[in-house]
Amino acid sequence: MTSAESDPSDSSPVATEKIVSLCARRGFIFPSSEIYGGINGFWDYGPLGVELKNNLKAAWWQRMVRERGDVEGIDSSIVAHPRTWEASGHVEHFSDPMVDCRACKKRFRADQLEGIEGCSSREGTSEHDFTEPVGFNLMLQTKIGASEESASVAYLRPETCQSIFTDFKRVREAARQKVPFGIAQIGKAFRNEITPRNFTFRSREFEQAEMEFFVHPSDRDRWFDIWREERMAFHREIGLQESQTRFREHAATELAHYAGRAVDVEFLFPFGWQEIEGIHDRGDWDLSRHSEFSGKDLSMTDEDGERYTPMVVETSMGVDRTALAILVAAYCEEVLEGGESRTVMRFAPKLAPVKVAVLPLSKKLKEPAHAIAKDLRRSFNCFYDDSGNIGRRYRRQDEIGTPFCVTYDFDSQEDGKVTVRDRDTMQQERIPIDGLARTLRERLEGEA
Ligand code: GAP
């Protein structure tokens, strides 16, 4: 296990470790640069992980952009003009309190000292010898320009939404939108977290799916409530149960100085209730500040001819945190009749990385089975496996959450049918090969 994975503050390390181990073993998620020992706070998604994450992002885009006439999508650059971050307040305020231990040289967040490991460098005590807390800016810096002397400092964006604000006027005019309307995007964000931890939960590079909804000031509370409900409905749709999710309203003392209201969607991880998404009333802070810093007027005129700056209701989902929640929610160990056990990932079918596996009963049936897989691949992510006994092959598919296994056997040549096995019920049914893709699609959509 690398340092990126271990976390002494986990309250149920066993459960987290099971997820971490399955993710590495089956190629969902593993440490970045693993052959060099990993790099703390950075993770790679393997063949199954990227499918899972892409399915999650596609579901979000479908719900938030495609199905709505009042939300437009964009894909902005990761590096923005440095003034962006002065206007947003990040240069001045985006910091966490940090302390260093003078003895062991380890660095901690001053507000998260509970449960940390003791100092290993002091004689007779495991207590750390902390410095005074100082503010540590979380933005990752880079330099732009060909020569060292003329290069200027720029930042890797710590949130994706700021370019939505700077692109507001262009997108509204190009898309001929009127307030109320929203702009959405999915993309990478970077934060130099002092203590990355809990697997991918707190990373230094992660993805956000954010939507900024611009409303008239008289309408901000109504839209806040609408988006709050919409977002929880989405989390249900992707398989997070009622008992595993809750809202947490921020107390006035927790709110950013510009925020009217903030509600977190929290998920019950093995390490406790934690935020996967924030729904924020950002007021007119962002557009007003960018107007001020850029000199470009971003205000509008309402029906009564009054000038106003639109207010913003934001929904900001962490893609990696939500993917981790999906993995935790799907994970299930079962003891079957006869005492055999299986690990099954009960993903909602539309999120499952592999939708169907084709398993010929014997290697002699390879050719017709390959032909079926080739046909199914035009519709789904389909896996082909002809090695090992059929029971073991089913278990391998259960462990990665494949909703259907299709078995081609010696009777298939005679009756033109295959056996379709359902991941959850494990029931098997003979189904005609002719029209198989259509039948499976109907079932996947029916269960979605
Ligand atoms: N634009 C608002 C914003 O960025 P935030 O609460 O700081 O708000 C939104 O972040 C979401 O981004 C969080 O709910 C979380 O899911 C995700 N996120 C934030 N920091 C993260 C980190 N270090 N690692 C993984 N996800 C993170």
Image (cartoon, grey):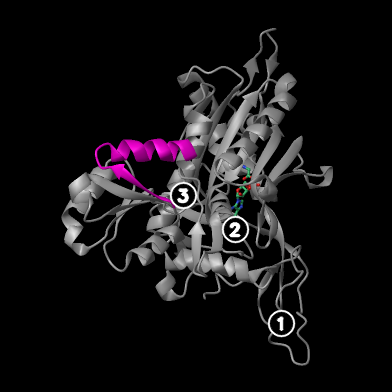
Q: Which residue corresponds to mark 1?
A: 119
Asked if the stretch drawn in magenta spans residue 441, the answer is yes
In the image, farthest residue toward the bottom = 124
Q: Which residue corresponds to mark 2?
A: 201
Callout 3 amino acid: Lys
Picture coordinates of residue 18, whole percent (x, y) = 55, 68
Picture coordinates of residue 85, whole percent (x, y) = 60, 44
Q: Decide if residue 423 is on the left or right side of residue 293.
A: left
Query: Is residue 148 in view from this perspective?
Result: no
Q: Which residue is rendered at x = 56% and y = 45% of the image?
A: 239
Which mark lies nearer to you, 2 or 3? 3
Do the residues bearing badges 1 and 2 touch, measured as CB atoms within 8 Å?
no
In the rendered structure, find residue 238 and report the number of the disc placed on it. none
Q: Which residue is rendered at x = 25% and y = 55% of the image?
A: 409
The residue closer to the viewer here, 91 or 78, is 78
- The residue segment tinted magenta is 427-448
The yes-or-no answer for disc 2 within 8 Å of ligand 1 is: yes
- What is the spatial separation of the Cα atoms under label 1 and label 2, in whole angstroms? 25 Å
The yes-or-no answer for disc 3 within 8 Å of ligand 1 is: no
Q: Decide if residue 410 is on the left or right side of residue 446.
A: left
Which mark lies nearer to you, 1 or 2? 2
Which structural element holds mark 2?
loop
Q: Which residue is rendered at x = 78% and y = 69% of the image?
A: 132
Q: Which residue is rendered at x = 16% and y = 55% of the image?
A: 367
